[in-house]
Amino acid sequence: FQRHAPPSPTLNFTDPAASPTLLPITTCIPDLDDDFEASTLEAVSEAEGIKHRGAEHRWPGHLPEELWASVVKFTIDLVSVPQLARISQGFPELVRSRSVWSGRPVRVPPMLVAQLAPRLSKWLDAWQSSTQLIVPHSNQLLTEVARRAPALPVEVLWRFDRHMKGAGVEILRHGVTARRISDEELVVLGDAPLRMAPGLAPYLELRLDERGENIGDGLNDFGFGVTASHPHEIQELGCVADEVPRSWVVDFTECSVVLSANNHEAAKGRRVTAQDLVQGHRVGLRLAHDAVEVFINGQLRERLVPSPEDCIPPGVSLFPVFDLYGCTKQLSRSDAEEPLP
């Protein structure tokens, strides 16, 4: 793998951009470029059309602005901004108001970072009273946010690291997805630690996007877990996730699930196996202080209890680690911070 990653593509924070201030967001993943201008022009056209329909169309149902602000605050996120802005004449201004973003966290999806960059100042103004800005790992973005909004709390959301990976892994969808493209060098790390939500044990969840023909020995499937080593400290990823230094990895086998701590078996369970892994299912690990709990689609399936010396030490930063062996061909990260049905 690339020990020293090349610089990331430069984000444009200074383009005056004559385009409107509506954040042009589409749901076309992974490539937004073709829809960028179309989405912007469509939003502007509809907003201008609404202005000419008269003041009675400013707020639907003649309900007061305060009521609509409460409704929007309950539902808004960055992905929904264009749709909400098209509802009526008053909504383009409403979705950019501080009131609908106050007292709640704001999450920036990885695929929107480049589109957000030239409009960052306008949106940081709207987010002044937000509880937290949650962004993908980007040194450029973090630097700009710290400079322009130093009082806004920021937390980093992990992605699959496009550099800290084996040659057999391809990173897609702006770091949201990892795909196997070879039969060897199938280990990949996350580029930031797991988010530590107040009052919750760290939780790591993936979606099994694609399962296919088994590679390897036919007995072992994929493994995933965490490492207490910062990716920049790791010299060799190894052949499987278990070999990553200072790691705790759960491996799925044909007849069991095994917790490896620092590349030795620390606990084993038989209530869930590789045969329970189904394409489209969500697989999660909750890292309790004395155990690693395995979830499938939000349901607890196994609790792996290692000896005290093999437990994850409290308070350490934990970076995700994965391998794509067995039948697992493609994984995507989940935003879940706890098991959900």
Image: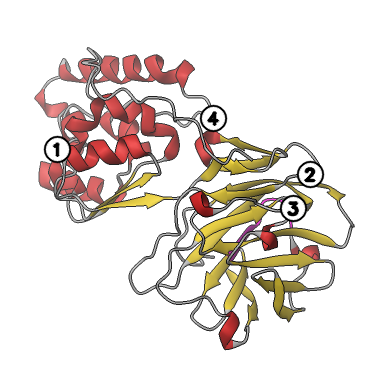
Query: Magenta includes 4?
Result: no
Look at the numbered disc 1 and give the secondary structure of its residue: helix
Q: Earlier in the sequence, mark 3 or mark 1?
A: 1
Image-based side of 109 in relation to 248, left or right: left
- In the picture, the disc for residue 239 is 3
Pointers 2 and 4 in contact (C-beta within 8 Å): no
Q: Which circle, 2 or 4, is nearer the viewer?
A: 2
Q: Earlier in the sequence, mark 1 or mark 2?
A: 1
Q: Position of residue 82 (x, y in %)?
A: 32, 30
Number of residues whose C-alpha sits closer than 10 Å to that of mark 1, classed few (under 14), some (14–19) or many (20 or more): some
Q: Is residue 70 above or below residue 54?
A: below
**Residue position for label 1:** 125
Front position in the image: 20 or 51 = 20
Q: Which circle, 1 or 2, is nearer the viewer?
A: 2
**Residue position for label 2:** 184
Which quadrant is the C terminus positioned in?
bottom right
Which quadrant is the N terminus positioned in?
top right
Q: Is residue 334 above or below residue 137?
A: below
Mark 3: amino acid: Cys
**Residue position for label 4:** 30
Q: CA separation, marks 1 and 4?
A: 28 Å
Q: Residue at the spot x=34%, y=32% of the render?
A: 83
Look at the numbered disc 3 and give the secondary structure of its residue: loop
Q: Earlier in the sequence, mark 2 or mark 3?
A: 2
Mark 1: amino acid: Asp
Q: Position of residue 28 (x, y in %)?
A: 50, 28
Look at the numbered disc 2 and give the secondary structure of its residue: loop
Mark 2: amino acid: Glu
Q: CA separation, marks 1 and 2?
A: 47 Å
Pointers 2 and 3 in contact (C-beta within 8 Å): yes
